Image (tube, rainbow, N blue to C red):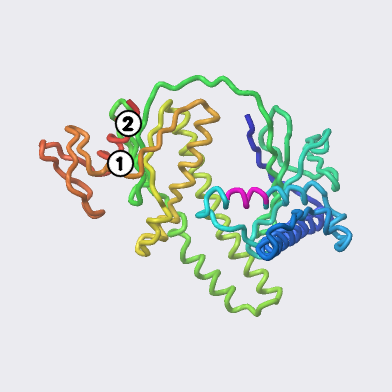
Protein backbone atom coordinates (compact mmCIF):
# COMPACT_ATOMS: atom_id res chain seq x y z
CA UNK A 1 0.00 0.00 0.00
CA UNK A 2 1.31 3.43 -0.95
CA UNK A 3 1.03 6.17 1.64
CA UNK A 4 2.39 9.73 1.63
CA UNK A 5 3.88 11.56 4.63
CA UNK A 6 4.24 15.33 4.51
CA UNK A 7 6.91 17.16 6.54
CA UNK A 8 8.12 20.75 6.89
CA UNK A 9 11.60 21.47 5.50
CA UNK A 10 14.11 23.98 6.88
CA UNK A 11 16.51 24.52 3.95
CA UNK A 12 19.49 26.86 4.00
CA UNK A 13 19.51 29.92 1.76
CA UNK A 14 21.49 28.13 -0.95
CA UNK A 15 19.15 25.14 -0.77
CA UNK A 16 16.14 27.44 -1.09
CA UNK A 17 17.70 28.93 -4.23
CA UNK A 18 18.20 25.43 -5.64
CA UNK A 19 14.59 24.49 -4.96
CA UNK A 20 13.30 27.66 -6.63
CA UNK A 21 15.59 27.03 -9.62
CA UNK A 22 14.30 23.45 -9.91
CA UNK A 23 10.68 24.62 -9.76
CA UNK A 24 11.43 27.01 -12.63
CA UNK A 25 13.22 24.38 -14.73
CA UNK A 26 10.40 21.87 -14.28
CA UNK A 27 7.84 24.48 -15.30
CA UNK A 28 10.02 25.55 -18.27
CA UNK A 29 10.45 21.98 -19.57
CA UNK A 30 6.75 21.20 -19.13
CA UNK A 31 5.74 24.28 -21.13
CA UNK A 32 8.34 23.58 -23.83
CA UNK A 33 7.16 20.00 -24.29
CA UNK A 34 3.52 21.06 -24.35
CA UNK A 35 4.29 23.77 -26.92
CA UNK A 36 6.11 21.28 -29.15
CA UNK A 37 3.41 18.63 -28.87
CA UNK A 38 0.82 21.18 -29.96
CA UNK A 39 3.05 22.12 -32.92
CA UNK A 40 3.54 18.45 -33.86
CA UNK A 41 -0.20 17.96 -33.84
CA UNK A 42 -0.69 20.92 -36.16
CA UNK A 43 2.03 19.59 -38.50
CA UNK A 44 0.48 16.11 -38.55
CA UNK A 45 -2.73 17.59 -39.97
CA UNK A 46 -0.72 18.97 -42.89
CA UNK A 47 1.26 15.75 -43.39
CA UNK A 48 -0.65 12.77 -41.88
CA UNK A 49 1.95 10.20 -43.03
CA UNK A 50 4.89 11.86 -41.28
CA UNK A 51 6.15 10.10 -38.16
CA UNK A 52 6.54 12.49 -35.26
CA UNK A 53 8.84 11.88 -32.30
CA UNK A 54 7.54 13.23 -29.01
CA UNK A 55 9.86 15.69 -27.21
CA UNK A 56 11.84 14.71 -24.09
CA UNK A 57 13.67 16.89 -21.50
CA UNK A 58 17.07 15.72 -22.82
CA UNK A 59 16.32 17.45 -26.12
CA UNK A 60 16.45 20.89 -24.52
CA UNK A 61 19.63 20.52 -22.45
CA UNK A 62 22.12 21.43 -25.23
CA UNK A 63 20.20 24.63 -26.02
CA UNK A 64 19.45 25.47 -22.38
CA UNK A 65 22.46 24.35 -20.28
CA UNK A 66 20.90 25.58 -17.00
CA UNK A 67 18.69 22.46 -17.13
CA UNK A 68 21.79 20.37 -16.33
CA UNK A 69 22.07 22.08 -12.93
CA UNK A 70 18.94 20.44 -11.51
CA UNK A 71 17.87 16.87 -10.80
CA UNK A 72 17.26 15.07 -14.11
CA UNK A 73 14.52 12.93 -12.52
CA UNK A 74 12.52 16.05 -11.73
CA UNK A 75 12.47 16.86 -15.46
CA UNK A 76 11.56 13.28 -16.34
CA UNK A 77 8.63 13.46 -13.93
CA UNK A 78 7.48 16.67 -15.63
CA UNK A 79 7.31 14.66 -18.88
CA UNK A 80 5.28 11.96 -17.10
CA UNK A 81 2.91 14.64 -15.73
CA UNK A 82 2.33 15.94 -19.25
CA UNK A 83 1.70 12.44 -20.60
CA UNK A 84 -0.77 11.84 -17.76
CA UNK A 85 -2.54 15.13 -18.55
CA UNK A 86 -2.94 14.07 -22.19
CA UNK A 87 -4.21 10.62 -21.17
CA UNK A 88 -6.78 12.15 -18.83
CA UNK A 89 -7.94 14.55 -21.55
CA UNK A 90 -8.50 11.80 -24.13
CA UNK A 91 -10.16 9.59 -21.50
CA UNK A 92 -12.54 12.37 -20.45
CA UNK A 93 -12.54 15.63 -22.50
CA UNK A 94 -14.41 17.41 -19.70
CA UNK A 95 -11.14 17.32 -17.73
CA UNK A 96 -9.81 19.93 -20.13
CA UNK A 97 -6.81 20.15 -22.45
CA UNK A 98 -3.38 20.42 -20.73
CA UNK A 99 -2.59 24.04 -19.83
CA UNK A 100 0.68 25.94 -19.75
CA UNK A 101 2.07 26.47 -16.25
CA UNK A 102 2.23 30.04 -15.00
CA UNK A 103 5.10 31.27 -12.84
CA UNK A 104 2.72 33.08 -10.48
CA UNK A 105 -0.32 30.78 -10.42
CA UNK A 106 1.00 27.24 -10.84
CA UNK A 107 1.96 25.18 -7.78
CA UNK A 108 5.71 25.41 -7.16
CA UNK A 109 6.83 21.80 -6.81
CA UNK A 110 8.94 19.03 -8.29
CA UNK A 111 9.05 15.25 -7.86
CA UNK A 112 12.10 13.00 -7.76
CA UNK A 113 12.46 9.22 -7.37
CA UNK A 114 14.42 7.07 -4.96
CA UNK A 115 17.17 5.17 -6.79
CA UNK A 116 19.45 3.01 -4.64
CA UNK A 117 19.02 5.13 -1.52
CA UNK A 118 19.20 8.54 -3.19
CA UNK A 119 16.32 9.57 -0.89
CA UNK A 120 16.63 8.66 2.77
CA UNK A 121 16.13 10.14 6.23
CA UNK A 122 19.04 10.31 8.66
CA UNK A 123 19.41 12.25 11.92
CA UNK A 124 16.41 14.56 11.34
CA UNK A 125 17.56 15.30 7.79
CA UNK A 126 16.38 14.06 4.41
CA UNK A 127 18.84 13.36 1.61
CA UNK A 128 17.72 14.46 -1.86
CA UNK A 129 19.47 13.97 -5.22
CA UNK A 130 21.76 16.79 -6.38
CA UNK A 131 21.43 18.81 -3.15
CA UNK A 132 22.29 16.49 -0.26
CA UNK A 133 20.85 16.62 3.24
CA UNK A 134 18.10 19.09 4.16
CA UNK A 135 16.75 19.61 7.67
CA UNK A 136 13.16 18.52 8.21
CA UNK A 137 10.68 18.35 11.07
CA UNK A 138 9.66 14.70 11.14
CA UNK A 139 6.66 14.83 13.48
CA UNK A 140 5.83 11.13 13.02
CA UNK A 141 7.91 8.08 12.02
CA UNK A 142 7.06 5.60 9.27
CA UNK A 143 8.19 2.15 8.18
CA UNK A 144 8.43 1.18 4.53
CA UNK A 145 10.33 1.66 1.28
CA UNK A 146 10.58 5.24 0.00
CA UNK A 147 9.42 5.39 -3.63
CA UNK A 148 9.54 9.12 -4.41
CA UNK A 149 9.50 12.58 -2.87
CA UNK A 150 7.77 15.81 -3.88
CA UNK A 151 9.23 19.13 -2.72
CA UNK A 152 6.83 22.09 -2.74
CA UNK A 153 6.78 25.75 -1.75
CA UNK A 154 3.80 27.76 -0.53
CA UNK A 155 3.04 31.37 -1.46
CA UNK A 156 4.59 32.38 1.86
CA UNK A 157 7.88 30.64 0.92
CA UNK A 158 7.49 27.70 3.28
CA UNK A 159 9.00 24.46 2.01
CA UNK A 160 7.48 21.01 2.45
CA UNK A 161 8.31 17.50 1.34
CA UNK A 162 5.80 14.73 0.66
CA UNK A 163 7.42 11.29 0.85
CA UNK A 164 5.64 8.40 -0.87
CA UNK A 165 6.19 5.15 1.04
CA UNK A 166 5.35 1.58 0.08
CA UNK A 167 4.05 -0.09 3.24
CA UNK A 168 2.66 -3.51 4.07
CA UNK A 169 -1.07 -3.79 4.70
CA UNK A 170 -1.93 -3.24 8.36
CA UNK A 171 -4.47 -5.29 10.26
CA UNK A 172 -7.01 -2.90 11.75
CA UNK A 173 -9.56 -3.76 14.44
CA UNK A 174 -13.03 -3.45 12.90
CA UNK A 175 -15.55 -1.06 14.45
CA UNK A 176 -19.16 -2.05 15.13
CA UNK A 177 -21.09 1.10 14.35
CA UNK A 178 -22.69 2.54 11.22
CA UNK A 179 -23.39 6.20 10.53
CA UNK A 180 -25.27 8.27 7.97
CA UNK A 181 -23.88 11.76 7.31
CA UNK A 182 -25.94 14.55 5.78
CA UNK A 183 -23.89 17.60 4.76
CA UNK A 184 -25.22 21.14 4.97
CA UNK A 185 -24.50 24.84 5.36
CA UNK A 186 -26.30 25.71 8.61
CA UNK A 187 -24.56 22.71 10.20
CA UNK A 188 -21.53 21.20 8.52
CA UNK A 189 -22.63 17.62 9.19
CA UNK A 190 -25.70 15.97 10.67
CA UNK A 191 -24.90 12.41 11.74
CA UNK A 192 -27.14 9.55 12.88
CA UNK A 193 -25.66 6.23 14.04
CA UNK A 194 -27.24 2.78 14.26
CA UNK A 195 -28.29 3.49 17.85
CA UNK A 196 -30.52 6.23 16.38
CA UNK A 197 -28.53 8.92 18.13
CA UNK A 198 -28.20 12.12 16.08
CA UNK A 199 -25.52 14.79 16.32
CA UNK A 200 -25.14 18.13 14.57
CA UNK A 201 -21.63 19.47 13.93
CA UNK A 202 -21.54 23.26 13.63
CA UNK A 203 -20.22 24.84 10.45
CA UNK A 204 -17.00 26.66 11.51
CA UNK A 205 -17.21 29.23 8.65
CA UNK A 206 -13.49 30.03 8.74
CA UNK A 207 -13.57 32.28 5.67
CA UNK A 208 -16.60 34.26 6.85
CA UNK A 209 -15.03 34.89 10.26
CA UNK A 210 -11.81 36.22 8.69
CA UNK A 211 -13.45 38.09 5.81
CA UNK A 212 -12.83 41.59 7.21
CA UNK A 213 -9.13 40.86 7.76
CA UNK A 214 -8.87 39.51 4.20
CA UNK A 215 -10.54 42.62 2.77
CA UNK A 216 -8.20 44.88 4.76
CA UNK A 217 -5.14 43.01 3.47
CA UNK A 218 -6.50 43.20 -0.10
CA UNK A 219 -6.95 46.97 0.17
CA UNK A 220 -3.41 47.35 1.53
CA UNK A 221 -2.04 45.32 -1.37
CA UNK A 222 -3.96 47.33 -3.98
CA UNK A 223 -2.39 50.59 -2.72
CA UNK A 224 1.19 49.37 -3.20
CA UNK A 225 3.16 50.15 -6.35
CA UNK A 226 3.62 47.17 -8.64
CA UNK A 227 7.13 45.75 -8.50
CA UNK A 228 7.98 47.42 -5.18
CA UNK A 229 9.26 45.66 -2.07
CA UNK A 230 6.32 46.98 -0.07
CA UNK A 231 3.94 45.30 -2.51
CA UNK A 232 5.78 42.00 -2.07
CA UNK A 233 5.49 42.37 1.72
CA UNK A 234 1.76 43.10 1.42
CA UNK A 235 1.34 40.08 -0.87
CA UNK A 236 2.96 37.81 1.72
CA UNK A 237 0.73 39.24 4.49
CA UNK A 238 -2.36 38.47 2.40
CA UNK A 239 -1.04 35.01 1.53
CA UNK A 240 -0.47 34.25 5.21
CA UNK A 241 -4.07 35.12 6.05
CA UNK A 242 -5.37 32.81 3.32
CA UNK A 243 -2.90 30.15 4.46
CA UNK A 244 -4.18 30.35 8.04
CA UNK A 245 -7.78 29.83 6.86
CA UNK A 246 -6.72 26.85 4.76
CA UNK A 247 -4.88 25.32 7.73
CA UNK A 248 -7.86 25.85 10.04
CA UNK A 249 -10.16 24.19 7.52
CA UNK A 250 -7.81 21.25 6.97
CA UNK A 251 -7.37 20.72 10.70
CA UNK A 252 -11.15 20.66 11.22
CA UNK A 253 -11.77 18.27 8.32
CA UNK A 254 -8.97 15.89 9.28
CA UNK A 255 -10.09 15.64 12.90
CA UNK A 256 -13.75 15.07 12.01
CA UNK A 257 -13.03 12.53 9.24
CA UNK A 258 -10.58 10.62 11.48
CA UNK A 259 -13.15 10.52 14.26
CA UNK A 260 -15.78 9.12 11.89
CA UNK A 261 -13.38 6.42 10.67
CA UNK A 262 -12.33 5.49 14.22
CA UNK A 263 -15.89 5.14 15.48
CA UNK A 264 -17.67 3.51 12.52
CA UNK A 265 -17.20 0.49 10.29
CA UNK A 266 -19.70 1.66 7.64
CA UNK A 267 -20.08 5.33 6.67
CA UNK A 268 -22.82 6.53 4.32
CA UNK A 269 -22.49 10.04 2.92
CA UNK A 270 -24.54 11.96 0.39
CA UNK A 271 -23.12 12.94 -3.00
CA UNK A 272 -23.14 16.68 -3.64
CA UNK A 273 -22.01 18.38 -6.86
CA UNK A 274 -20.39 21.49 -5.38
CA UNK A 275 -19.38 22.83 -8.79
CA UNK A 276 -22.98 22.88 -9.98
CA UNK A 277 -24.31 24.27 -6.70
CA UNK A 278 -21.83 27.15 -6.79
CA UNK A 279 -23.60 28.50 -9.86
CA UNK A 280 -26.06 29.90 -7.34
CA UNK A 281 -24.14 33.08 -6.49
CA UNK A 282 -26.15 33.63 -3.31
CA UNK A 283 -24.55 30.64 -1.59
CA UNK A 284 -21.42 30.14 -3.73
CA UNK A 285 -19.00 31.61 -1.17
CA UNK A 286 -20.51 29.55 1.66
CA UNK A 287 -20.24 26.35 -0.39
CA UNK A 288 -16.60 27.11 -1.22
CA UNK A 289 -15.89 27.75 2.46
CA UNK A 290 -17.51 24.54 3.72
CA UNK A 291 -15.39 22.14 1.58
CA UNK A 292 -17.72 19.15 1.25
CA UNK A 293 -15.63 17.63 -1.54
CA UNK A 294 -12.44 17.66 0.55
CA UNK A 295 -14.23 16.09 3.51
CA UNK A 296 -15.55 13.20 1.40
CA UNK A 297 -12.11 12.79 -0.22
CA UNK A 298 -10.49 12.46 3.20
CA UNK A 299 -13.14 9.99 4.29
CA UNK A 300 -12.49 7.90 1.18
CA UNK A 301 -8.74 7.45 1.60
CA UNK A 302 -8.95 7.01 5.39
CA UNK A 303 -11.58 4.30 4.96
CA UNK A 304 -9.16 2.55 2.59
CA UNK A 305 -6.28 2.84 5.08
CA UNK A 306 -8.29 1.65 8.09
CA UNK A 307 -10.38 -1.06 6.46
CA UNK A 308 -13.72 0.76 6.64
CA UNK A 309 -16.57 0.83 4.11
CA UNK A 310 -17.62 4.13 2.58
CA UNK A 311 -20.94 4.25 0.73
CA UNK A 312 -21.69 7.27 -1.43
CA UNK A 313 -25.41 7.71 -1.98
CA UNK A 314 -26.61 8.26 -5.53
CA UNK A 315 -26.57 11.89 -6.60
CA UNK A 316 -30.33 11.82 -7.16
CA UNK A 317 -31.23 10.00 -3.96
CA UNK A 318 -33.90 12.22 -2.31
CA UNK A 319 -32.78 11.78 1.29
CA UNK A 320 -34.47 15.03 2.29
CA UNK A 321 -37.83 14.31 0.67
CA UNK A 322 -38.35 10.71 1.90
CA UNK A 323 -40.01 10.04 5.24
CA UNK A 324 -37.65 7.89 7.30
CA UNK A 325 -40.62 6.40 9.20
CA UNK A 326 -42.90 5.15 6.40
CA UNK A 327 -40.72 5.59 3.27
CA UNK A 328 -43.17 7.90 1.51
CA UNK A 329 -41.58 10.43 -0.85
CA UNK A 330 -43.16 13.83 -0.35
CA UNK A 331 -43.10 16.92 -2.51
CA UNK A 332 -39.86 18.81 -3.08
CA UNK A 333 -39.10 21.21 -0.25
CA UNK A 334 -37.33 24.55 -0.53
CA UNK A 335 -34.23 25.32 1.57
CA UNK A 336 -36.17 27.45 4.05
CA UNK A 337 -38.29 24.45 5.14
CA UNK A 338 -36.34 23.02 8.10
CA UNK A 339 -39.11 20.87 9.62
CA UNK A 340 -42.05 19.04 8.08
CA UNK A 341 -44.77 16.52 8.90
CA UNK A 342 -45.41 13.43 6.78
CA UNK A 343 -48.87 12.15 5.88
CA UNK A 344 -48.23 9.26 8.28
CA UNK A 345 -48.09 11.77 11.12
CA UNK A 346 -44.33 11.64 11.74
CA UNK A 347 -42.75 15.04 12.39
CA UNK A 348 -39.22 15.44 11.04
CA UNK A 349 -36.24 17.69 11.39
CA UNK A 350 -35.18 18.05 7.75
CA UNK A 351 -31.49 17.32 8.29
CA UNK A 352 -31.85 14.53 10.85
CA UNK A 353 -34.42 12.81 8.62
CA UNK A 354 -31.94 12.96 5.72
CA UNK A 355 -29.13 11.44 7.83
CA UNK A 356 -31.47 8.60 8.94
CA UNK A 357 -32.37 7.84 5.32
CA UNK A 358 -28.67 7.71 4.47
CA UNK A 359 -28.03 5.38 7.41
CA UNK A 360 -30.73 3.01 6.11
CA UNK A 361 -28.66 2.58 2.92
CA UNK A 362 -26.00 0.78 5.00
CA UNK A 363 -28.32 -2.21 5.60
Q: Are marks 2 and 1 in contact (CB under 8 Å)?
A: yes
The N terminus lies in which quarter of the figure? Answer: top right
Is residue 334 among what the camera can see?
yes
Residue lying at 62% horizontally and 52% vertically, measured from the top left:
86
* Residue to which mark 2 is pinned: 361
Q: Is residue 103 visible?
A: no
Q: Which mark is residue 355?
A: none
Q: Residue at x 79, y 35 (%)?
A: 120
Q: Is residue 225 above or below residue 168?
A: below
Depicted 362 relative to depicted 130: above or below:
above
The image shows residue 278 at horizontal and vertical percentages of 40, 59
Q: Is residue 218 left or right of residue 342?
A: right
Q: Name the side, left or right, on which 85 lies relative to 205.
A: right
The spot of residue 197 in percent (x, y) is 30, 31
Q: Is residue 212 left or right of residue 133?
A: left
State which tag comes first along the sequence, 2 or 1: 1
- Decide: few, some or many residues near mark 2? Use Cα within 10 Å; few <14, some 14-19, many ≥20: some
Q: Secondary structure at mark 1?
A: loop
Image quadrant containing the C terminus: top left
Q: Dividing the picture into quarters, in which one does residue 32 lie?
A: bottom right
Task: Name the main secondary structure of what is drawn in magenta.
Answer: helix
Total numbered labels: 2
Going 71% across and 28% down the picture, which residue do you hit?
A: 144
Q: CA distance from mark 2 to mark 1?
A: 10 Å
Residue position marked by numbered label 1 in the rendering: 317
- Magenta region, residue range: 83-88
Packing grade of label 1 (10 A; few <14, some 14-19, many >=20) is few
Give the vertical position of 322 relative to 203 (above or below): above
Q: Is residue 332 magenta?
A: no
Outermost residue, front side = 49
> In this rendering, would 209 be left or right of 317?
right
Residue 43: name its quadrant. bottom right
Amino acid sequence: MLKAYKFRLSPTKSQQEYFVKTFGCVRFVYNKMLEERIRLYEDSKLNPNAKQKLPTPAKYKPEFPFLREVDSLSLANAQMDLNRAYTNFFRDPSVGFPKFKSKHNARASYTTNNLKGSIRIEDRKVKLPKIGFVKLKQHRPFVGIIKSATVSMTKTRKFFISILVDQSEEQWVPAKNKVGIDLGLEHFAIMTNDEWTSEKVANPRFLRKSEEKIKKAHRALSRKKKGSKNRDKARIILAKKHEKIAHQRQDFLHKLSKRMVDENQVIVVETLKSKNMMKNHTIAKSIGDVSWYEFVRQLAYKCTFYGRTLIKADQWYASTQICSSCGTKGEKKTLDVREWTCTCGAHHDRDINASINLLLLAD
